[in-house]
């Protein structure tokens, strides 16, 4: 760290006599450095502590000096005063266009020069203070944004986890489904049928919404939700309403907080439409093909795969190979064929995800 008791003024002039005169005008008020040509001025400007201001005669190729100083981030903020031998509006304008902060002409009056130097130093200090405060504010905003995002993620996960635990599923199921959706989304990101939805901005939001797919089941009676035997037609109609309950919960959040967001849109699509079937035989709306939201089509494959490889009160866990074959057989009927093809292309990733998030023993 370099301590400076006074601001450093760098003086550059090809005339030794001019250097002495300019130095005499400034040395009682500032630390001064002297350079007798442009290259020397550029070298000195790189030395620490860097000058707070440069006073340069136009004769030392001051255009090049200004250009090089402005092109270097380390020296771009150093104000430059150019000294002209005579008042020349054209030359003055050119120097200002090249980045000079001010232009003075000989003969130089000490009081005028000191006033201009002082003003430029104060402006430089004010800019540096504002830049520092701006960076600090950006850090605070970024930190608060991270905290809010973590809080929102925690709330989503807690809600989804509670819903899953009601019917014997685990947080591992949520993690697997979430990562399976992400793997499918990445695989399909460049596909012309999916690219409009699977942007780099949308995929993380879609994955965050994926664990909410069954939150509507909190409104299903235990006698139906936990029934180990096959549901009656009447019971199944009640079970099917979990998609509507989930949609309504998301809609209520959107209304309470002033409207929908991309995340809430994905959450609504996933909760409401993940039980739709590609051939139109699903529920609750009987949507078919492209009418089913992309997010719900991805979730359907991810959720059914995980349900097949997981043990339930009403079924044993199937092998990966059996699950893959059953989903392949459902291509074009239950599932979007392109989503199934994507899963087949990355089935090793599906196996790795399942191994990474096993259910508790």
Image (tube, helix red, strand yellow):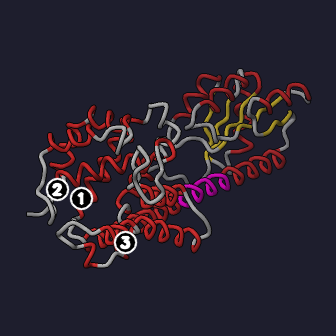
Mark 1: few/some/many CA within 10 Å (<14, 14-19, 20+): many
Q: Picture coordinates of residue 31 (x, y %)? A: 61, 46
Q: Residues within 10 Å of mark 2 (few under 14, many from 20)?
A: some
Q: Is residue 19 magenta?
A: no
Asked which secondary structure carries label 3, the reply is helix
Instruction: Identify the residue at image location x=65%, y=54%.
Output: 125
Task: Give yes or no for contact between labels 2 and 1 (Cβ–Cβ under 8 Å).
Answer: yes
Q: In this rendering, would 65 be left or right of 187?
A: right
Q: Secondary structure at mark 1?
A: helix
Task: Identify the secondary structure beneath mark 2.
Answer: loop
Q: Name the residue at 18% across, 49% down.
A: 354
Q: CA distance from mark 2 to mark 1?
A: 8 Å
Pick the quarter of the image with the C terminus.
bottom left
Asked whether, in this view, residue 50 is left or right of residue 178, the answer is right
Labelled disc at residue 274 = none
Quarter holding residue 331: top left
| Dominant secondary structure (helix, strand or loop) of the stretch shown in magenta | helix
- Of residue 82 and residue 318, the one placed in the foreground of this image is 318
Magenta segment boundaries in residue numbering: 125-137
| Residue under numbered circle 3 | 238
In the picture of the structure, the residue carrying the numbered disc 2 is 310
Q: Nearer the viewer, residue 131 or 197?
A: 197
Among numbered discs 1 and 3, the one appearing first in the sequence = 1
- Mark closest to the chain's N terminus, 2 or 1: 1
Q: Position of residue 262 (x, y in %)?
A: 53, 55
Number of marks drawn: 3
């Amino acid at each position: 760290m370099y301590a400076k008791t006074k601001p450093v003024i760098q003086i550059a002039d090809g005339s030794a006599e001019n250097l002495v005169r300019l130095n005499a005008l400034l040395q009682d008020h500032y630390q001064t450095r002297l350079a007798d040509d442009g290259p020397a001025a550029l070298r000195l400007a790189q030395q620490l502590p860097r000058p707070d201001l440069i006073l340069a005669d136009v004769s030392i190729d001051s255009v090049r000096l200004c250009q090089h100083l402005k092109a270097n981030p380390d020296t771009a903020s150093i104000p430059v005063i150019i000294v002209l031998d005579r008042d020349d509006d054209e030359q003055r304008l050119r120097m200002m266009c090249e980045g000079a902060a001010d232009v003075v002409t000989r003969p130089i009056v000490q009081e005028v020069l000191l006033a201009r130097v002082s003003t430029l130093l104060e402006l430089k200090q004010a800019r540096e203070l504002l830049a520092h405060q701006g960076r600090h504010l950006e850090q605070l905003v970024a930190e608060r944004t991270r905290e809010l995002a973590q809080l929102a993620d925690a709330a989503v996960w807690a809600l989804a986890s509670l819903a899953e635990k009601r019917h014997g599923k685990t947080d591992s199921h949520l993690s697997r489904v979430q990562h399976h959706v992400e793997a499918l989304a990445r695989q399909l990101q460049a596909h012309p049928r999916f690219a409009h939805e699977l942007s780099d901005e949308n995929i993380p939001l879609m994955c965050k919404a994926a664990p909410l797919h069954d939150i509507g089941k909190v409104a299903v009676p235990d006698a139906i939700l936990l029934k180990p035997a096959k549901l009656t037609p009447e019971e199944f109609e009640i079970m099917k309403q979990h998609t509507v309950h989930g949609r309504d919960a998301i809609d209520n959040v959107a209304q309470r907080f002033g409207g929908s967001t991309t995340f809430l849109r994905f959450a609504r699509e996933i909760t409401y439409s993940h039980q739709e079937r590609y051939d139109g035989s699903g529920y609750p709306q009987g949507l078919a093909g492209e009418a089913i939201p992309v997010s719900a089509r991805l979730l359907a494959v991810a959720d059914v795969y995980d349900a097949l490889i997981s043990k339930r009160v009403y079924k044993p866990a199937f092998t990966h190979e059996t699950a893959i074959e059953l989903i392949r057989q459902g291509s074009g009927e239950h599932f979007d064929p392109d989503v199934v093809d994507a899963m087949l292309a990355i089935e090793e990733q599906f196996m790795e995800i399942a191994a990474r998030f096993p259910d508790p023993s």
